[in-house]
Each structure stands twice: as structure tokens, then as C-alpha cells.
Amino acid sequence: MRWPLIPVSLGVLAALGCQPAPQVIVNPNATQSGLTVSGTATVRVKPTLVVLRLGANFTDGSIKTAKSKTETTIKAIAAAVSREKIAPEDVQTTSFRLNQTYLDNGRRMAWNCQSSLEIRVKDIESAPQVLEAALAAGANQVQSVEYTVEELQEVRAKARDEACQVAQAKADQYGRNFGVKVGKPISISETTPGGWYYGSNTMAQRMSADMPAASAGDSERILSSGSVEVQLTVNVNYSLN
């Protein structure tokens, strides 16, 4: 005897760790036949890389002065982090902008020049010292400090394997409980919660051009490594036999 296909839509959040209990929703109006399940896995690893995004921002009535101050500061930052054993290939200019602006409620025209660097710190423990050196060299903007993993693809692959195992286990369990035979996947898709999530391991701090650089002690206060979290969900639609 062949069991009839039952349209089922499953909202299942299955993750490693504490997660909401799985829900099964039988939808008589569902257009997709078979059994749809999702498996979510979360992998946490120690960070192996710190990415500092910072730079210089100066405004002056003279375009030459604004540009010169910014370029001189960027060169000083690069030299300072080099003394902290950051390789030249790990320091890159990511942006340079030169724009007209107005001061004193629009009564005086001036020029604003901004330039940003991306600094990759592979020695996690030295990140506070590298940031301190950059600030001491004149950096007056800190866009972000991000803790991540160099071999992120390997972490994603591990999360993907675990998510697939969760989805398959769910399908097998529902097959047993409902007395149906789960067939081959009809469709498979992958989603992430708003992109790869680093949680509390990504710190962003913005500083205005007029704000003095943070003191040496501030770099110790704002940096915290913790762990990098990668979460991935696999959605699978199985045929039912």
C-alpha cells in the first residue's frame, strides 16, 4: 500500500546548544509536497585574526593642508604598526576621499580629507599594542575592530556538515513517527542569519575628526577576543514514499 503525499511545512530550528523546540505545521494549502525540514548548526572557534579598520580625517581651509595632514598621518600609522611586526602586505589603504565642506553654518568653505587603512593582525595577543601604536601615530578614526578566523571556509564547512546531519535526523524521526518512508531530497538550500555572525566578537567604534585619539589604556579596554561564531541553516525538501 502506498501512503499518500502529505503537504507538510516544517518550521524547525535545530541547532547545537539551546534552541527553541522544533515545530511541525501541517498546511493543507501548501503547494510544495513532501517533507520539508531545516537543520541549524552553530560552530564556535577561537579567533586567529584581528582586522583593524582605522584612519585619519582632517578638515582645513586649504586643500593642500588637509591632504598633507591626512597623508602624513597615514604614513606615520603604517610606520608605527610596522614597528609592531605587522608585515607590509597586511597593511592596505581601503579608501581615500577629498570633499568640499562648509564650516560656521555654511559661511566658510573648507576641505575635508579622509583616508582609511585595513590592518590585519595575526598575533591576537598583540592587537591592543598595534591599535595603541596606530592611535599614538595620529589615527583619529576607528571604524571597526573585528575578530575573525583566517580559514573561515573550513569553519563554514564544519557547520554545514553538522547542519546536514541535523536535517537528516529530523527527517528520519518524522518518517518514523508518521509511518512514512522518506525518499531522496527534492531540493536543498542554505541560509545564514543575516550573513556570517561574529556576535560579540565584532566591535565597532567611531570617532569624529575633531576628537583626540584614544589614550593607550583605551586600546586595552575596547578589545576583547572571545570566540568567533558561525551559524548555518540547511533547508531540505524530501519526497515521501
Image: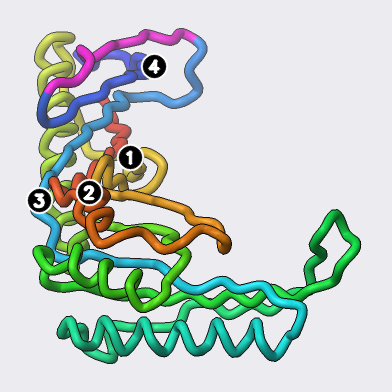
Identify the residue position indicated by label 3 in the image.
Answer: 45
- For marks 3 and 2 on the same chain, the one whose residue lies earlier in the sequence: 3
Q: Which residues are magenta?
A: 18-28
Q: Would you call the spot at circle 1 few (<14 residues within 10 Å), some (14-19), or many (20 or more)? A: few
The N terminus lies in quadrant: top left
Measuring from the top left, give residue 136's x and y in whole percent.
Answer: 33, 73
- Quarter placement of the C terminus: top left
The disc placed on residue 7 is 4
Q: Residue at image x 23%, y 15%?
A: 20
Residue linked to disc 2: 221
Of tags 3 and 2, the one toward the viewer is 2
The residue depicted at 22 percent of the width and 72 percent of the height is 130
> Helix or strand or loop: what does disc 3 sit on?
strand
Q: Main secondary structure of the magenta part?
A: loop
CA gap, disc 3 and disc 2 = 22 Å
Give me the C-alpha separation between circle 2 and circle 1.
Answer: 51 Å
- Sequence-wise, the earlier of marks 1 and 4 is 4
Q: Position of residue 121 (x, y in %)?
A: 20, 72
Which amino acid type corresponds to the residue marked 2 in the rendered image?
Arg
Q: Nearer the viewer, residue 143 or 140?
A: 140
Residue 92 to residue 172: above or below: below
Q: Amino acid at mark 4?
A: Pro
2 or 1: mark nearer the eye: 2
Q: Quadrant of residue 52?
A: bottom left
| Residue to which mark 1 is pinned | 186
Residue at 85% x, 54% y is 105
CA gap between label 4 and label 3 equals 39 Å
Q: Nearer the viewer, residue 127 or 107?
A: 107
The alpha-carbon separation of the residues under discs 3 and 1 comes to 33 Å
